[in-house]
Amino acid sequence: GTVGKLELQVPVSGLSSGSLVLCLSNLNIRASPYQGTTYDPEKEEEQRFAALNVKLEALEQQIYQRLYAQSQSWLSSFASSYFTSMIENLKLVINDVHFCYEDTVSVPSMPFYLASL
């Protein structure tokens, strides 16, 4: 898909208390069924093992972050709370969404199209 217009509105005064507004306009989204390859049990096992490794690395990262966070000064705590309040005040505005679903895979003799404006 595509994004026609992306606009970020940042308040000049009161950045930590004002709303940060992200506007997305003229979104064109296309979807269709995946036309992938056949099932490979070895590849499935490799992907499962890789996913487990990613989870393990994420847990290790959390431990390191907690240890690092405990050693940080009040300045990082202030910056963290400042950016957290900015993210909590984030507003997302989406306008003009065009959605199209095309299925020529499920039943090749009868293609199916669905669009919404």
Image (spheres, rainbow, N blue to C red):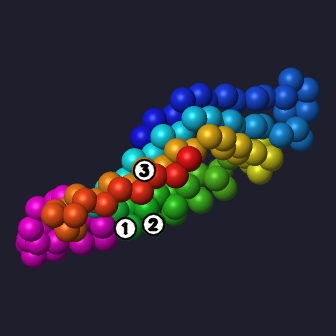
Say which label, 3 or 1, has the lower sequence index: 1
Q: How many marks?
A: 3
Q: Is residue 58 above or below residue 44?
A: above
The span from disc 2 to disc 3 (Cα, nearest Å) is 39 Å
Badge 1: how crowded within 10 Å, few (<14), some, or many (20+)?
few
Q: Secondary structure at mark 1?
A: helix
Nearer the observer, disc 2 or disc 3?
Answer: 3
Residue denoted by label 3: 100
Q: Which is more toward the observer, 48 or 30? A: 30
Viewer-nearest of discs 3 and 1: 3
Residue 6 is tagged as: none
Disc 3 marks a residue whose amino acid type is Cys
Q: Residue at x 25, y 59 (%)?
A: 111
Is there CB contact under 8 Å for labels 2 and 1? yes
- Residue 25 lies left or right of residue 38; in this view the side is right
Residue type at the position of mark 1: Leu
Q: Which residues are magenta?
A: 35-52
Could you tell me which secondary element the residue under label 3 belongs to? strand
Q: Give the mark, 2 or 3, whose residue is nearer the N terminus.
A: 2
Which residue is found at the position 66% from the left and 43% from the top? 94
**Residue position for label 2:** 59
**Which percent across, then down, holds residue 18?**
88, 38
Residue 88 shown in magenta: no
Label of residue 56 in the image? 1
Q: Position of residue 61 (x, y in %)?
A: 46, 58
Q: Residues within 10 Å of mark 2 (few under 14, many from 20)?
A: few
Answer whether residue 45 is magenta in the image. Answer: yes
Q: Percent x, y for residue 116? A: 52, 52
